[in-house]
Amino acid sequence: MFVTVYITLADYWKLKRDDILKFYSGRCSLEKIADKWILPKIGMLKVTDITSSDIESVIRDIYEHGEPKYVVSWANAIFRKIFHEAAVDKLIKDDVCDGLQPVISDSTDKRIFSEEQEISLLRAFQRTSQPELLTLSMITGLQYTELSASRRDDYSVDEKTLTINKKRKTKGSPETVVTKRAIPLSDISCAILNRAVVKQVRKNRKFPGNESELIFTNHFNNPIIDLGRENYAKIRKESGIYDFMMKDLSSNFGVHAMKYKVNPVALKRYMGYETGKSINDFSAACHDKSNVKDIKACDDYYRGLKGHDNDE
């Protein structure tokens, strides 16, 4: 394989991958990002034909699918390295990544929404295929993966509790340990769950032979693996929060809880954390607003990308 002006991005990646990734310790993760997001969308294009709009289209896809900011950041890094190598090989003269703004990735960022944003999100949830699941996650602060794994017999109408079953493997043992914690529910949360149960009973009647004991299932009455790009797109469009991710709902709940001086030990047990790191981050976010600035920058960057829709 030779480097010529006719080489595609996919072939150029195969040829130069080692040079591009040699200084990265997380090489495996970067390769996965390239294989999942970059190559399927623009890998067939010639390197010399790729424009900044093509790159921004990939970045927008990553945002709309709800991937963490670090995925966007690493995708940016991959693009910059690819086109730096292409410039060295004299395939291109101009750097098509000049306008690509960096996205700051910080795993300690904890989201807190304003009251207006919360209302916008609650309205946006009603436009999705899982309004009850999303609303309940926001109100309770529970992760949607935990809620989507809940069965109808985990919900006690009389005691107003939802039992969350969490599976984990203990260090040095192949056995899986299941921990249970009973989540107290407000009247609003119970009303949402009651509605979800009624909808699930109807769905079971619609799919005889494929009934489910879960409270929440997808359109085909199967377990919910992820929310899907369509739901994320609706939430972001309707709410105007373009970098929304599901983990933001838990962060929002946790930060508000710390603002109202909830016992940190009780909050840790309630949210099912094994360490106190997230609780400490919630507490820090009550006083440090630097993460809000990063999030606003991320939103502004996404809005900038949206402006290129008419160019494609």
Image (tube, helix red, strand yellow):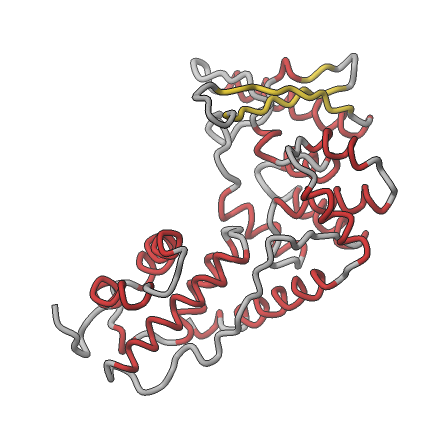
Residue that sits furthest to the front in the current view = 172
Q: Residue furthest right?
A: 260
Q: Quadrant of the N terminus?
A: bottom left
Residue at image location 72% in from the left, 20% down from the top: 182
Percent position of residue 244, x then y: 62, 53
Place of residue 6 in the rendered image (x, y in percent of width and height, measured from the top left)? 17, 75
At x 31% / y 56%, what residue is drawn? Answer: 40
Residue at coordinates 79% horizontally, 37% vertically from top-left? Answer: 264
In the rendered image of this protein, does residue 178 appear above or below residue 256? above
- Horizontally, residue 235 falls left or right of residue 255, namely left
Find residue 227 and report its horizontal and vertical position in percent: 53, 40
Depicted 244 relative to depicted 44: above or below: above
The residue at 31%/87% (across/down) is: 93
* Quarter of the C terminus within the rendering: bottom left
User: For residue 146, what is the image quadrant?
Assistant: top right
In front of the other: 140 or 84 = 84
Q: Position of residue 306 (x, y in %)?
A: 54, 68
Above-or-below relation of 57 to 249: below
- Front residue of 198 and 139: 139
**With 176 as the anchor, is 146 left or right in this view?**
right
Is 175 in front, or is 142?
175
249 vs 51, left or right, is: right
Res 307 → quadrant: bottom right
How many marks the image carries: the answer is 0
